[in-house]
Image (cartoon, rainbow, N blue to C red):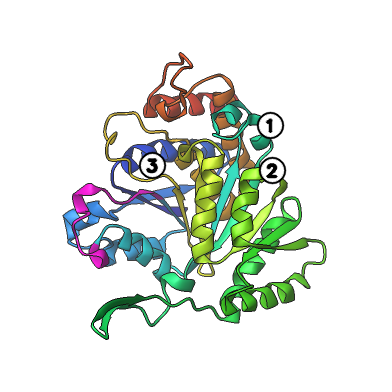
Amino acid sequence: MHPILILPGDGIGPEVTREARRVLETVAGAAGIPLGFEESEIGGASIDKHGTPLSDEALEKARRSRAVLLGAVGGPKWDAMPVDTRPERGLLRIRKELGLFANLRPAHVFPALASASTLRPEVVEGIDLLVVRELTGGIYFGEPRGQAIVDGRREARNTMVYDEVEIARIARVAFESARRRRREVTHVHKANVLEVSQLWMQVVEEVAKDFPDVELHHQLVDSMAMLLLREPAAYDVIVTGNLFGDILSDEAAMITGSLGMLPSASLGEGGVGLYEPVHGSAPDIAGEDKANPLAAILSAAMLLEHSLDAPEAAATIRTAVEQVLGDGHRTADLVAADSGETAIGCREMGDRVLEKIGAA
């Protein structure tokens, strides 16, 4: 029995994780993969119940799990709280405590949604890239940091720090991922001005020697931001640090047309994977059955692939999603204003995916 922890979180999180769990249970059952589920709180829901964005009890459940499926955290209800106690801190803590250093963000354009992008269809057709972002180092965690009064003026500082071990392990994740794809890695950096990026260049080149079958390219982050808009289909695996990856993965996500379609995985060396849609908590539509559950459902597919070593079961989910979209079913976020299409709800979208899985 593989223990799976569900952390629904805030806003639309409970709605989308409900649909993802239904799909996960169905596909895993058909594949003979035994699953056992627990639920707990994270983010604002945990603050309201336990006074902290992640309780020790929830963290212990996560450590005992094979994988964690998370919905979303945050919302205006908690925005006035001190930064160190807000819902997002629960997400940062669970990543740190579970040693989740590698964030995998696929950006794939389903053919039926090529027209949903703000870019021309001929530019986005064929996009199938993966952003591998280092998740636990860099400027978000480096010391010293903080605010101070210096010479009578307010000053703030953050420190970007990486060591060679942190760089090498994320580089290996990128190269191993590329071996399962088109065997190309693009390392994104700012080595022309940052010593940290210069070390990244050196270490990534060293790791590349162990993967002679994978082609390596280097690209400055500013030009990479431009190239992702100009020729996004040209890229396979992009590997970079925490800050650059945070920005570029969101850019890649929006190129595909909707954040509601994009899953993610956070992996580490401890064996527990964390899977979550990249969209926010969308509190304005929470509880209204308007949320798009497909990113959460596709996150469940990543869970099957990476934590349960079941790529065929994962492919079943992805194929079902593609078929549902091909049939013209859309949640509100995927309906163009002038299309005349009628949106379906979160629950119905889950039902449609399950119907396709049942027909497979």
Q: Nearer the viewer, mark 3 or mark 2?
A: 2
Mark 2 or mark 1, earlier in chain: 1
Q: Is residue 25 visible?
A: no
Q: Are marks 3 and 2 in contact (CB under 8 Å)?
A: no
Q: Is residue 83 magenta?
A: yes
* Residue 185 image offset from top left, x and y in percent: 71, 59
Tag 3 secondary structure: helix
Region of the chain picked out in magenta, as a range: 70-85
Q: Are marks 2 and 1 in contact (CB under 8 Å)?
A: no
Q: In the visual, does 263 lie left or right of 75?
A: right
* Residue 341, above or below 270: above
Q: Is residue 73 positioned above or below 157 on the image?
A: above
Q: Residue 201: image x %, image y %? A: 67, 74
| Camera-nearest residue between 321 and 272 | 321
Left or right position of 315 against 351: right
**Amino acid at pointer 3:** Thr
Residue placed under numbered mark 2 in the picture: 233
Calculate the distance from the C-alpha at mark 3 to the C-alpha at mark 2: 30 Å
Does 211 appear above or below 5?
below
Identify residue for label 1.
122
Q: To which quarter of the image does residue 239 belong?
A: bottom right
Which residue, given by chain and number where applicable, does mark 3 sit on? 17
Q: Which residue is at 53% across, 60% downward?
A: 245
Q: Mark 3 or mark 2: which comes first in sequence?
A: 3
